[in-house]
Image (tube, grey):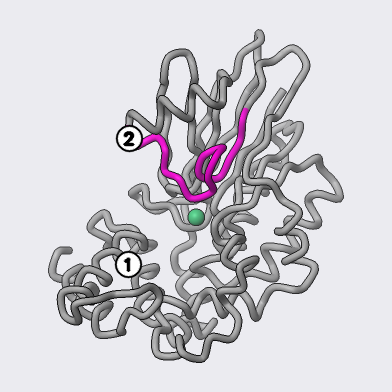
């Protein structure tokens, strides 16, 4: 029994294609996708098409990530008062423009967590952030890790969301994260996913990292217009995939920009983060590397 687990594609259809191509002859019984289908890369239509085609041929389980929640909450629609904040809101608007009504309905139908049952093997709980919250990074704090493990009561929990490969044990529960297909923060930047091999009543993880076609990714990124849509956010993406990153994440860049915004203005309300604040973060990042 082999289960492929892929998370956090973030519109990177180039990475997704490579991963699925690798898995083609690996005797995969079914595929689990842990959410975040849109994000930093422009290949939204292509990503959705690949996923819809795959589910016609193979058994697939899909979860909803926080990126899907943003679309369901319609954050990418209207709000002209947000026009001055492209680096915060640009990609949500871009996704909104590139998703169909059917895509959004599909997202709406997805759970944030489910239990995958296979006869003769222990149950596996899959989730995006945690089984209880779509954007919870539960494994970094011992208390939330203990809570989630106790509440979930499973021997195996597989999560995504952090974009970083993880394997840890809490009591007798294995917690694994395959990393991100499209926007991995693990260095070197590669396309990351996993296969769960079921043998003798247990699961063994195989973490896979494929070399990324950086030139092709950069070409697509520049061609897409995303540097205009979300100027600094996309510059961060460029640094990330070229590994000139100094270990940052987009989330940490957002936090830093909000910190600067608060310091300079005495207040900072998402998504109203001036571009100048991102410019300062970008400068800091370049000086760091
Ligand atoms: Fe993500």
Query: For the point 42% across and 14% down, which residue is it?
Result: 171
Q: Residue 255 at what x, y percent from top left? A: 29, 64
Query: For the point 54% across and 53% down, which residue is it?
Result: 8
Report the magenta residues as a range: 125-141
Cβ(mark 1) to ligand 1 < 8 Å? Answer: no
Residue nearest the observer in this picture, 216 or 199: 199
Q: What SS does tag 1 mark?
A: helix
Q: Is residue 171 above or below residue 92?
A: above
C-alpha separation, residue under disc 2 versus residue under disc 1: 21 Å
- Mark number, residue 254: 1
| Image-based side of 179 in relation to 273, left or right | right
**Which residue reaches farthest right?**
56
Tell me where residue 96 sits by quadrant.
Answer: bottom right
Q: Is residue 134 magenta?
A: yes
Asked whether residue 12 appears in the rendered view, the answer is no
Q: Quadrant of the C terminus?
A: bottom left
Q: Are marks 2 and 1 in contact (CB under 8 Å)?
A: no
| Image-based side of 195 in relation to 146, left or right | right
Q: Residue 287 at what x, y percent from top left? A: 13, 70
Tell me where residue 267 sits by quadrant.
Answer: bottom left
Q: Is residue 52 magenta?
A: no
Tell me where residue 36 sits by quadrant.
Answer: bottom right
Query: For the point 51% across and 57% down, which residue is it?
Result: 182
- Mark number, residue 141: 2
């Amino acid at each position: 029994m082999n289960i492929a687990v892929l998370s956090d594609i973030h519109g990177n259809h180039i990475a997704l294609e490579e991963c699925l191509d690798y898995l083609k002859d690996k005797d995969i019984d079914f595929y689990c996708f842990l959410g975040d289908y849109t994000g930093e890369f422009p290949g939204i239509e292509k990503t959705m098409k690949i996923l819809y085609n795959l589910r016609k041929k193979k058994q697939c389980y899909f979860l909803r990530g926080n990126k899907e929640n943003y679309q369901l909450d319609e954050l990418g629609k209207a709000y002209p008062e947000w026009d001055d904040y492209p680096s915060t809101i640009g990609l949500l608007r871009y996704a909104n423009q590139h998703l169909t009504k059917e895509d959004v309905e599909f997202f709406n139908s997805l759970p944030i967590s489910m239990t995958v049952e296979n006869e003769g093997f222990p149950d596996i709980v899959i989730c995006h952030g945690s089984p209880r919250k779509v954007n919870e990074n539960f494994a970094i704090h011992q208390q939330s890790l203990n809570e989630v493990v106790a509440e979930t009561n499973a021997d195996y929990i597989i999560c995504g969301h952090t974009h970083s490969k993880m394997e840890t044990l809490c009591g007798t529960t294995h917690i694994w994260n395959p990393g991100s297909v499209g926007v991995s923060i693990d260095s070197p930047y590669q396309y990351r996913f996993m296969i769960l091999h079921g043998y003798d009543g247990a699961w063994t993880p195989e973490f896979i990292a494929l070399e990324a076609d950086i030139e092709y990714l950069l070409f697509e990124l520049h061609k897409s217009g995303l540097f205009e849509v979300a100027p600094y956010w996309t510059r961060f993406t460029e640094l990330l995939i070229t590994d000139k990153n100094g270990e940052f994440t987009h989330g940490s860049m957002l936090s830093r920009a909000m910190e600067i915004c608060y310091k300079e203005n005495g207040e900072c309300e998402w998504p109203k983060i001036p571009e100048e604040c991102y410019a300062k973060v970008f400068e800091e990042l370049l000086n760091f590397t």
